[in-house]
Amino acid sequence: MRSQRILVLMHKTLVPPENLQGYSPRQIEEFRTEYDVVTQLKASGHDVRSLGLGDDLEPLRKAIVEWRPNIAFNLLEEFNGIVSYDQHVVSYLELMQQPYTGCSPRGLLLSRDKALAKKLLCHHQIKTPAFVVLAKGKRISVPKSLCYPLFVKSVSDDASLGISQASLVSNLVKLKERVEFIHHHTGSAALVEEYIVGRELYAAVLGNQQLITYPVWELTHKNRATEKVLIATRRTKGNAGYRKQHGIDSHAAQGLSVTLRSHIDMVSKQIYRALSLTGYARLDFRLGADNQLYVLEANANPCLSADEDFAASAAHAGDDYATLLDKIVKLGLGYKAAWRA
Ligand SMILES: Nc1ncnc2c1ncn2[C@@H]1O[C@H](COP(=O)(O)OP(=O)(O)O)[C@@H](O)[C@H]1O
Ligand SMILES: [Mg+2]
């Protein structure tokens, strides 16, 4: 691909250094994605600038007006400490007629609210665990139709915030405790779902109109002595030592029939379209013991570290990191935002 002027947007504390010398593994973990993306885009021959944002859009306006980037590579996950405000920065990019990578404001809005996304998916007859939303300050009760064990999480937070083995509850007392915990610790309403026993599968989707999927990925664990059930908690996702200790690994899903694979691909594309996702996204599924596929959530703009699930699954299909990032840039350049009409 022709060399592009790429403005990489990230949180101001995550602007990566030129090289990793002198940084501890813990420090590197913090800015890993930003470092990987910036380093690869440069290595691919692009003219790359990192822009750290906090609570002020002026530096963004200035960079767009003065440097005229071909594209903004969006790695922002919040604005002014508010996770759901990332979509407003993307709206600002659209208002500035600035092409960007990843998901549109509409897709970010629809996928961020897990309950809203589930309602839309139900309309399309896409299976998702039965659920109820319990708002802060309201009486905690669950419909009789919901069967224990239940799983309690935040309706809008991601990256497994507030998720642990204690999220899985088997009676009303434990449920109330956990709902209050979610209200208190995340400030958001609690989403209570039926717990789906089964395999944990992830599907990576790429595209705007024409969609492609990468091989289905799976999270597994070997050592079940302390972690009785497999739950993708914060530690399970991001702590290398913890993963090693518990034999937790993610890899291409083995032993799925051809029919099941094509069903997962088809459902993934249906979800992507139903939620107006663009650019790239990762869908989290559980394959129930009944062999039914349930979607847990859709992640717009998932993690793009070189060794994370999305890039690993792309590499498994033959798209190395450079190719994956180039594809994401191309999709951003080709996205038909309303201002182009
Ligand atoms: N209904 C459910 N049944 C089984 N496991 C669940 C359910 N909901 C969440 N989990 C577990 O919790 C993890 C995180 O939940 P998820 O909805 O994906 O939130 P996050 O946005 O934090 O990733 C899932 O990957 C899965 O391991
Ligand atoms: Mg998830």
Image (cartoon, rainbow, N blue to C red):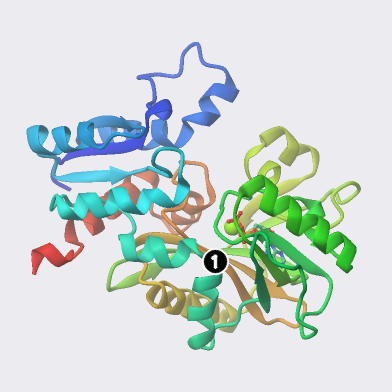
Residue at (21% x, 34% y) in the render: 58
Along the line of sight, the residue nearer the viewer: 69 or 212: 69
- Which amino acid type is shown beneath numbered disc 1? Lys
Query: Is 121 displayed left or right of 2 in the figure?
Result: right
> Which of the 4 image quarters holds residue 43?
top left
Seen as rendered, the residue at the extreme top is 22
Rendering coords of residue 100 (x, y %): 24, 51
Query: Is 208 displayed left or right of 262 in the figure?
Result: left
Rendering coords of residue 151 (x, y %): 75, 65
Quick check: is the Cβ at mark 1 less than 8 Å away from ligand 1?
A: yes
The image quadrant in which ligand 2 is located: bottom right
Rendering coords of residue 126 (x, y %): 54, 83
Can see residue 92? yes
Rendering coords of residue 39 (x, y %): 34, 31
Q: The residue tagged with tag 1: helix, strand or loop? A: helix
Residue at (52% x, 25% y) in the render: 28
Residue at (76% x, 81% y) in the render: 143
Residue at (61% x, 50% y) in the render: 187
Query: Is 97 displayed left or right of 180 in the figure?
Result: left
Q: Quadrant of the C terminus?
A: bottom left
Check disc 1 and report the residue beneath it: 114
> Which of the 4 image quarters holds residue 72?
top left
Along the line of sight, the residue nearer the viewer: 309 or 143: 143
Does 167 sit above or below residue 86?
below
Does 89 sit above or below residue 8?
below
